[in-house]
Structures are given as C-alpha cells and as structure tokens.
Image (cartoon, grey):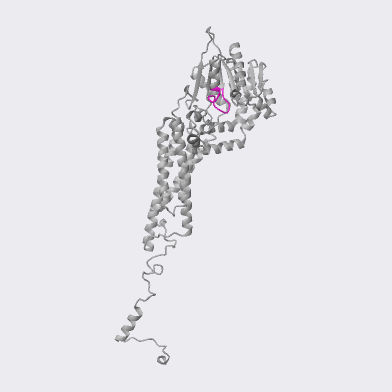
Amino acid sequence: MNRLWGGGPKRHDGSPRDSLDQDRESAPDEHTRLLPNRVESTNYLSPDDPAVSPYNLWSVRIVRYLTILFTVLTFIWWTILLVSTFVTPPGFHTRGSGFFPFSYTSLALANLLFTLIFFAIPSKAVRILSIVMGALWLVNAVLLISVEKTRHEEGWVGMVSVLWALLMAIWTLLTDRLVQWGKTEEEERLTGRAETRRTLGEWTAVLLSTILMVIFSLVVLLTTCTLVIRALDAGLAPPGKLFWVDGDKYLMHVYCHGNGTDSKGTKLPTVLLEGGESPVEYGLWQFADNAVNNGSISRYCFVDRPGLAWSDTAPSPLSAGMAVEAVSEALARAGEDGPWILASAGIGSIYSRIFSARHGGDIKGLVLIDPLHEDDLDNIGSAGRGFWLWIRGIFSPLGLDRIPGALFKGRTKEDRVWGQSAYQTGKYVWAKLQENLVADTLSKRDLASSTAIQNPDVPLNLISSGVHIRRDSGWEDKQRDLSHLTRNLKHWDIVNEAPPRVWDTWQGREAIEKRLHELVYAA
C-alpha cells in the first residue's frame, strides 16, 4: 500500500543512483547563502542583542564608576564656589571676581555629565573636539598661572579649578577612547566582527553629543579670549600704590596728588574723592587734576573701593561700613591722616557719610554731588537687580561685550580697567553684587548709625542735577532731605542742564570747583 501511494520512506541501498540523487540535493543553487547566517548560528549573537555591550568589560565599568566619582567631587566643589558668591568660606576668598573659577568648574561638571549620558555611544567627532577643548584648557591654565596679576586675583581656588577642568577634559577623552575600544572588542567577540552601522537612536545621540561638544568648545574658546584680554590689561600699572588691608587679605589702591600746604606753609585739607557707580578714575580724577592745576583745591586723594579699578575684591558679605573700614585702613597705611573734605557722587555719598561719622574732627566739609538717598537703598538691594547681576557675573568670563569691544570698537586697557568699559569686568559685577546683597540690611544699618552720630557742625554743600530732578519727581524731595544732614548747610546748587554726572558739564564743574575752593581755604 505504501509503495502504491508513494507515502513510505525512501530507501537508500548505496547504489550509484542514490549517490547521484544526494549530490543533486546538496549542490548549491541561486538560493544558497554565500556567507553563513550569524543570526542562526549558535556561535554568534545579533549586534542588536543587549548582551553585546562594552559594559561586559571590567575596565569599562571601573572607568564609569570613576567618572561618577569625579562628577560627585566636581559637584561638591561647584556648590562651594556657588556659596562663596554670597558668603565666602574661610580660605576660599578670591581677589578677582570669583566668576572664573565658577565658570571653570561649571564647564568641567557639564563635561562629566555629558560623558555619563553618552557613555556607551563613543564618537570620533567628540574625541576630536575633546582634544581641542583640552588644548584650550591648557592655554587657560598657562595664562592664569604664569601671569602674576591673574594668579594673584584668582588665587589657589582659580588655579585648582582650571587644572581640574583640564584633567577632566583629558579624562573624558580617554574614557571615550576606552569605551570605543571596549565596544569594538565585544562586538568582535560576540558577533564575529566590529559593527559599523548605527541605529537611528545612536545617530541622534551622536549628533546631539557633537552639537553639545561644539558649544562647550566655543564657550572655552571665549573664556580663553577673555583671559587673554585680562592678561593684557595686567600690564597697565596703577598710578598710585597698593596696600594690604583686612589682615592682608586683599589690596586697595590709594592715589594722592598735590601739595598739602599753601604758600605760607599752612596745612590745608585734602579733598577725598568717592565715585558713584563708576570708579573715581572715570571722570572725577580728571576733574580733580584740573582743579589742582587751576588752584581751586590744593591736594586730593582717592581710594578705589573693593572690586573697582585696581583694588581687589573683598570677601562676602561686604557692607558699606566694612568697605569704609577698608578705605580707612588703606589711607592709614599710606600715611594719609587728613584733615579731609569729602567729595562724593551718587552712591558714593553713602560711603562718604559713613566715613564722615567715623572720623569726627578730621572732617572739615562735605560736598555731596547728586547724592543717593538712603530710601533708594531698597532699589539697590532689590532681588531682581541682584539676580540680574548674578547672571551677568556668570556670563562675564565669556567676554561677550569685552571681546567685540577690543576687536571692533577700539577699547583700550584704560577703558576696561577704570573707563567706559569697566562695568563689563567680573570684578565690577562682583562688587556691585556684594553691594546689592546687603544694601537694604547691613549697609542701611551702617548708614543709620552713622547718621545718628554725624557731627552736626560739619559744613555741607549740596550740588544736584537739574536733569535728574526734572526726570524724577521725588528726587528733589530726597535732595532737600539730605540738605538737613548737618545743621551747617552752606549752599544747595541745582545745575539746570547737568546730568547725574554733574562734572560732565562746564556749569557742573564750575559749581563743584567753587564749593570745594570755599571749603578748602575756609578751613
């Protein structure tokens, strides 16, 4: 029956016909694979199998654990630097802005986090950009350590931060190379060959990682250019002398010019200048020089407040009273003991009033030039202004305004140190942020106590901006209130066409010189 329906098994009796049939069945045809099927092989895995991973290697896993450890350490250091912006821990004071070390650490932390996110997806483009970034970090480290001024300002905190950023750049480069080797090694072992194709997700990750590395490299490049500008500005010597203050923590710049006696040898008061938003060097210095030359005053001095012009920044917090103590110490170390006629503008009048109250009989007169009222300290200390200053400080190492100014606008060293571009520097922003943090608390308290003990017999001259009075309806009332600061108001001049920087106009300069001359020679 089986033979009838052909359903029985075919028998092979070893005849030549059977051998021919077997060869015919095993012979290759157009459907035969040229290469063995690795997927169906029992010896190899699919490249998409999760088991095909560089994490199989102990060396790769150890490197990942070390990267996590470095990230944690960097985050701790980053947190300390962030806190130092507001309250300086012992030993962490930087005489520069403090924003450069924070920037270095932020970039190192971002680089490590980026490495962890894309750890298993190495890329040749990322390795090339890592080499570029490492080279830029090396330039930063050399500039910061080799230039005396930058080394002085950034201190050990800045040097550690930039060297750590350099080491982390080298580490991430070596990590990416090791993971690439481990990935190739595992693919050859488990799939038979190194995989050259990438999935859509892997290509997306490579594209994203490359874009991020380009951004990181550009940020480091801009930081390097800003540091180069700082190194060039370090060659600008101060006109006066630098003195250590506050237990030799930082340096203050003191400059004096003129003769302290008249033709008969009688000692005359020295005019002590205090700038407003800008350093004294930007406007008031030139005015005072001209006043000495034309005989309106005999001698003047000024001390750059912490963080302005050639003076270092002070530890945080720094109230107006603390700044005045530093100014007093710097003057004492310079051998300047008065007597004084205080001439100040804008917010500088806050410091002059505190200085006047603390030096009693040494003060022979006050000249307040469009002064700031204590009620305006609330605006100076507003949270919104503080946050904006902090953001400006964080971005200041990029030099987004300094670099174009140097390249295309012809800004000079003088412009950046004390002139029209001084507000762009990290030191200036740091000083203004310190001013903001305690303006409506510690500084207001210092001013209130100083007002209470102010000598009521000190001669007072008030010079106000007519433009400011017309622009701000409440400004005139505040100026009037300040005219009662002492019981000895000599004059209150309103210079009609003068801006808040009253000395920028001829009428303003004439009014200031006249009142200073009267006080100097009346004393």
Q: State the residue at coordinates (66%, 20%).
A: 493
- Observer able to see residue 475: yes
Q: State the residue at coordinates (59%, 31%).
A: 438
Q: State the residue at coordinates (50%, 17%).
A: 257
Q: Residue 4's quadrant in the figure?
A: bottom left
Q: Residue 40's quadrant in the figure?
A: bottom left
Query: Residue 312, image x and y in percent?
Result: 49, 28
Q: Viewer-proximal residue, 335 or 349?
A: 349
Query: Residue 487, image x and y in percent?
Result: 67, 16
Q: Which residues are magenta?
A: 274-285
Query: Which quarter of the figure is the C terminus placed in?
Result: top right
Answer with left or right where residue 30 lies relative to residue 385.
Answer: left
Question: How many dots with numbers?
Answer: 0
Q: Viewer-proximal residue, 142 or 499?
A: 499
The answer to whether residue 414 is magenta is: no
Q: Viewer-proximal residue, 415 or 340?
A: 415
The answer to whether residue 284 is magenta is: yes
Query: Which quarter of the figure is the N terminus placed in?
Result: bottom left
Toward the top, the furthest residue is 264
Q: Image height check: is 14 above or below 422?
A: below
Q: State the residue at coordinates (61%, 31%).
A: 380
Q: What secondary structure is the magenta-colored segment mainly?
A: loop
Query: Residue 443, image x and y in percent?
Result: 60, 28
Query: Residue 293, image x and y in percent?
Result: 53, 15
- Observer able to see residue 72: no
Q: Viewer-proximal residue, 144 or 92?
A: 144
